[in-house]
Amino acid sequence: MPPFSSPQNLPFIESLYAEFLRNPDSVSRDWQEYFKKFPNGEATTVRFAPSFRPPTLFNPTSRVATPATELLDGPQAAALQERLDHLIRAYRVRGHIIAKIDPLGLPRQTPPELDPAFWGITGSDLDRRIHTETFPSCNPTTIREVVECLRTTYCESIGVEYMHIADLSIRRWLQHRMEPVANHIRLSRAEQLRILTRLTDAVTFEEFIRKKFVGAKSFSLEGSESLIPLLDLAIEKAAGQGVQEIVLGMAHRGRLN
């Protein structure tokens, strides 16, 4: 094939092809052999025009899925699905290890199995769309979005360790309530005000005890203020479901019971 590698050569090639159609002997033997490869001598098999349509009012610019983002199917999807299942289980089992629960914010070593590359998921695989029954909160979705949701659910300010539970129904019950919302509950305005009120009551009561009984031995809440609005909501929920009696075992007799 005659060498040409620059778009500036295209007008010249078109003119040669036009001469070839009028008189094949008017071009060199190399070009004759090259143009004869076209089926029926049709030049339409070679596209010199752009491969895209310019955006207009009737052809607006739209995002076209690239091969990397197409929904996979068949053996390739099955192999990728198996690797993704291993990654999802790794986050459910060991994601709590890197949860941001250290008040000092000290760095924690990330287990290698939490890296998609550990399971052979790299590069364009992260942007592939795939159906997954193991993580059904959003289907179809890209693997990158699944990983982001897993990190938000298990590796943020809430650490969850529950895969040791033998009852499969309990594990799935927890998963279906944590993963679709990524462990972020959307509270109404009234619920937010109620939590703020209970937190304020806890801090105010602790300050009252210290001022009322100066010098007396007492133990502060020490960061457990958030437990009070949680118990408040849990007790009310339990009462709505017919619970008649609740017994609380206190951690220390000197606490602000």
Image (tube, helix red, strand yellow):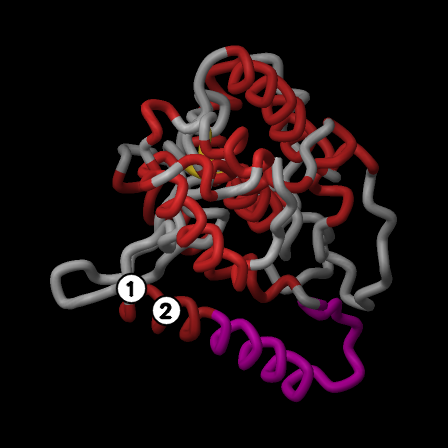
Which residue is depicted at the point 43% across and 74% down? 196
Residue 130, percent across and down? 45, 29
Q: Position of residue 126 (x, y in %)?
A: 59, 40
Task: Indicate left or right for 71 with 114 as reference.
Answer: left
Position above or below: 228 against 181: below
Dots 1, 2 in contact, CB < 8 A: yes
Determine the image quadrant of residue 46.
Answer: top left
Q: Is residue 166 above or below residue 70?
A: above
- Alpha-carbon span between mark 1 and mark 2: 6 Å
User: What's under tag 1, amino acid-wise?
Assistant: Ser
Give residue 188's mark. Answer: 1
Instruction: Classify mark 1: residues with Cα within 10 Å, few (<14), some (14-19) or many (20+).
Output: few
At x 85%, y 63%, the residue is 106
| Helix, strand or loop under label 1 | loop
- Mark 2 crowdedness (10 Å alpha carbons): few <14, some 14-19, many ≥20: few
User: What is the span of residues highlighted in magenta in the rendered image?
Assistant: 199-222
Q: Position of residue 234 (x, y in %)?
A: 41, 47
Q: Is residue 182 left or right of residue 60?
A: right
Name the side, left or right, on which 117 lies relative to 78: right
- Please name the residue shown 34% across and 39% down the image: 21
Which residue is tagged 2?
A: 192
- Given residues 158 and 54, the one toward you in this image is 54
Left or right, 140 with respect to 231, comes to left
Q: Is residue 51 visible?
A: yes
